[in-house]
Image (cartoon, helix red, strand yellow):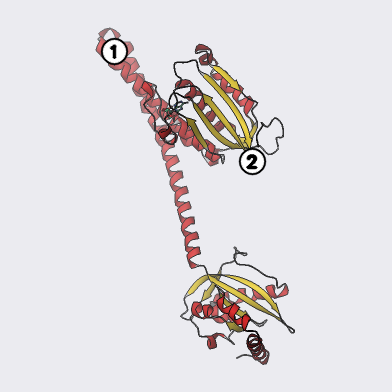
Amino acid sequence: MPTDTNVLDITAFRLLSESNPFLLQFLEFSPDATLILNSQRIILFANSQAQEMFGFKEEQLVGSALNLLIPERFHEVHEQHERQYLKNPVRRPMGRERHLEFIARRRDNSEFPIDISLSPLKTAESTWIAAAIRDVTRQKQAERQIQQYAGELKRSNEELASFAHVAAHDLGAPLRRVGMVSQMIQDDYAGELDENAKKLFDMLIRSVNQMEDLIRELLAHSKVGAQNLNLQPVDVNGLLDQILLEFSDTIEEHGIGIQRGELPTVSGDRVSLVRLFQNLINNAILYRSEQPLEISIDAVKRGAMLEFEVKDNGIGIDRKNHDVIFQIFRRLGNDGIPGTGIGLATCKKIVELHGGRIWVDSALQQGSTFRFTLPVEPSSGKSQPRGN
Ligand code: ADP
């Protein structure tokens, strides 16, 4: 039963709203269910949206304690919360306390999640609270669904990575045996094999080698994962020196021209970045045209990211294939150039795990420029390249 103070407060609010019709209109037209409460948590007013939301009539709400609209197990928490609020009654917008999930109760005892915004209304004697309430059932369902999808995606990615890893690893041993036995037959029975048999054995060995490449790259691809990233400052100049040294015989053999700008320090996983540059440079060499190959490597700063480019004057890539080539196992015609179709998928995985993106600018016979972004190493002020 309302106490005298509560009856006085209810009457005071009624008088206030009668003398100020704008106030009622304002509360009625609010898009949210709105309650006015006094400091005893007694409902002084409930707009029609609130009546509809909770399934109570106005006369059932006005004069009742707020607990009517709250499941019993939350009464204490809510009371504490409101006492706390009244000690420092400031405006508290919706969505502010994301860690608190408020649950409300309808007249039929069904429960639903709500978000509440509170505003203090100072009266001569005390402080009332205006509470705007929103049913967030749909939002919560969507959040839960997103969490569920994210969990499933993470699980299936992990399963896929471990499957690829195990499969690649276990396929290696029997394959090596096939290679070895073929080689032994060729060596031990050399005199007894005719030309045709030798050709068939050559084909067999080539296929085994190709399969070994495939397994090695698949294993490398499956090893690239967030948990394997060891982020640290990586001086790309030094990293490139090391990679170009590995390619030095090929560079000399084909008279390849290399141009490089002043390359920066990035925040990255050194092992993955070596693989990224190796793959791109290797591709530039593999897919060269008739003319002498020129490769240029440079970087430019773009905000918090560094944009790198690895440019060649090779056979180029038709515009319609610019996305396709980054998908795993996807290769273009390539005129018999051997490969696995994994290299660029690995590059994409590496760049994206670093928070960047990779793309290609190219046209057939016009050379290719592979561009990718990596995060700037925050502590390195030295030798960052030009840019905006
Ligand atoms: P792979 O080289 O083993 O086929 P990648 O994933 O590295 O696999 O490359 C996918 C395809 O993209 C290649 O088969 C090739 O057709 C094309 N490609 C990659 N790099 C270049 C390049 N620098 N110039 C022209 N084509 C390229």
Q: Which mark is residue 126?
A: none
Residue at (44% x, 51% y) in the render: 152
Q: Position of residue 106 (x, y in %)?
A: 49, 78
Q: Secondary structure at mark 1?
A: helix
Q: Which mark is residue 198?
A: 1
Residue at (57% x, 36% y) in the render: 373
Q: Position of residue 276 (x, y in %)?
A: 53, 30
Q: Earlier in the sequence, mark 2 or mark 1?
A: 1
Q: Is residue 96 left or right of residue 144?
A: right
Figure quarter occupied by ligand 1: top left
Please state the total of marks drawn on the protein image: 2
Q: Nearer the viewer, residue 338 or 363?
A: 363
The N terminus lies in quadrant: bottom right
Residue 205 versus residue 269 in the image, above or below: above
Residue at (50% x, 35% y) in the render: 359
Amino acid under disc 1: Lys
Question: Comparing marks 2 and 1, which lies closer to the viewer?
Answer: 2
- Which picture quadrant has residue 176? top left
Q: Residue furthest top?
A: 191
Q: Is mark 2 within 8 Å of ligand 1?
A: no
Q: Is residue 338 left or right of residue 236?
A: left
Q: Which residue is mark 2?
A: 304
Q: Nearer the viewer, residue 192 or 54?
A: 54
Residue 264 appears in the picture as rendered: yes
Count residues near mark 1 (Cα–Cα under 10 Å), then give few for <14, some for 14-19, many for 20+.
Answer: some
Q: Secondary structure at mark 2?
A: loop
Q: Position of residue 207 (x, y in %)?
A: 34, 23
Residue 142 versus residue 85 in the image, above or below: above
Amino acid under disc 2: Ala
Report, in whole angstroms, how far the alpha carbon at label 2 lies from the one at label 1: 58 Å
- Which picture quadrant has residue 332? top left
Residue 193 appears in the picture as rendered: no
